[in-house]
Amino acid sequence: MNPVKHSAGCNGCLWSRRHFLGAGAMLPLAAPSLVQQASAAAKLRIRVIYSLHGPQQTIPDWPNKGFDFVPVMEKFNNALSRRFPRMTFLPTMATGEEQAKKILNDDQTNAVDGYIVFQMNCWNKVVQTIATSGKPVLYVDFQFAGSGGFLVYSARFLRERTANVGFIASSRLEDLFAAVQCFEKTKKRGAADGFANAVAEVRIKHTARAGDLTCLPDPLQTLSAQECAQQIKQAKILAVRGTDSGSAPSMMTVPVVYVSFSEVNEAWAAADKDESRAIADLWQSSAALVEGVSRETLEQSAAMYLAEKAVMKKYDANAITINCLGGFYGGHIHAYPCLGFHQLANEGLIGGCECDVRSASAMVTLNALTKGRPGYISDPVIDTAKRQIIYAHCVASNRVFGPAGPANPFQILTHSEDRQGASVRSVMPVGYLTTTIEIHPDRNEILMHQAKTVDNDPDDRACRTKLAAEPIGDIEKLFAYWDQFGWHRVTCYGDLKEPINALADELGWKVVEEA
């Protein structure tokens, strides 16, 4: 990596790579002159905190292993200093609660007027501690990097009506600037209690207006609610997550069976080599691009697909979900299951990521209801600048209208978080209506929203497939439920609003409209 040159900026807002060696370390400042002190006294002092693992990412996680955050942080610091010369920005980093507490401690003598917390990695818990300061806190998503934690943590602030925390989820720098101006408004009022509302007004004002939401024709015949309810009871999900095998609690009436890693790995080792090579040939010839993935990895992935099919046949199951990261990093399995899941989905079966049984049961339900269309598990990102929700993941079908429907282009790339293995970027059709759900089994609830597909985002950060869609309804409502239903959502092409409501009635469940 090229070294970042040190630059002198507003009150030391820029810093060199060496200043990042200790996460949470404050930027050393030169002693100010009396004139500078007098000038600074009139300025708002805003602590900028980057919530992340470290300046360079050394572990698999969003945005990706090896990502250099230094230029990104310098960009934000430069932009803030230039745009707000009347404010003093005090940048630092924190990895979690302990360092966040130290920052609050130190700031008791620093007369800080407020905080900007950038969520740079997903799950570092920093903003929760900073929110207890009572000062205005602007919470910002660094998209395709910190979005999971940002959505979950923001939803909780909304639910708890945390009045001093406002949040911004935008790819446009001007929207950040507009929110930062709320610090001045709050300072004039002399209370932080209205900061969340002030930022919400700015966020809504700057959210892109709705586009043309007319969708392309998509004739779809669904099962009746009664038929679907019966079919999902006859389905079966294999949950591969550890060393134990045996029956498990059902999920949304779908039977679930635990299967050990070793059973899948043994089936992988026993997979027919000639058949694995033939499947690898098919993938290689069908993909629009194969990049960073060796032929050996393709054949190992094909063997994993055969292993998935073999284990599913043994248990008479039509769905399998595997703790892929835990299995791969723990040495329990020796190939990512992503391409296998892709192939299963294209055949009308279900391959679900991360041993997420809730999402797998949603996939089973959508597959049954639509007579074979695949559900697409994703980690969504919201961008108000484009009025979009971006469904991001490394596994996706390229036959979104079902096994007999047309194929869309796809690419075979490494798994995004660690740049290893093989995964899929599916370039899905745009202009169509989609229905997205997640379930809450403890409350017998189905969360649902609909959106029109408008783009496939090519950003290299985070997961490979990024289907961008414009929500039908109120995008503000989309911020509300992540802390209760989790980050995953399952998307299916087609207008399934009425069939989902009918199925919920049949099951005695409730539908919660997410947008």
Image (cartoon, helix red, strand yellow):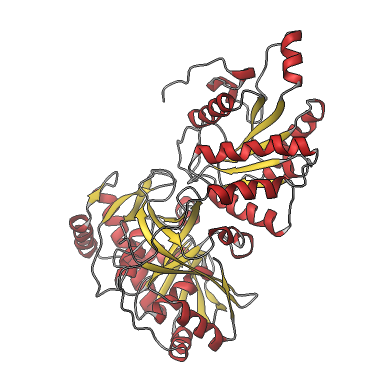
Expressed as whole percent of the image width and height from the top left, the position of residue 71 reads 48, 28
Q: Is residue 375 visible?
A: no
* Residue found 35% across the figure and 53% down from its top: 456
Which image quadrant: the C terminus?
bottom right
Which image quadrant: the N terminus?
top left
Which residue is at the front of the view, 266 or 157?
A: 157
* Residue found 63% across the figure and 64% down from its top: 484
Res 491 quadrant in image: bottom left
Give above or below for 331 relative to 474: above
Number of marks drawn: 0
Res 492 quadrant in image: bottom left
Give above or below for 378 relative to 83: below
Expressed as whole percent of the image width and height from the top left, the position of residue 121 reads 55, 43
Q: Is residue 83 visible?
A: yes
> Left or right: where does residue 262 sit relative to residue 176?
left
Res 179 quadrant in image: top right
Which residue is at the front of the view, 360 or 42?
A: 42
* Residue found 75% across the figure and 30% down from its top: 112
Expressed as whole percent of the image width and height from the top left, the position of residue 98 reads 73, 39
Expressed as whole percent of the image width and height from the top left, the position of residue 103 reads 73, 32
Give above or below for 402 relative to 458: below
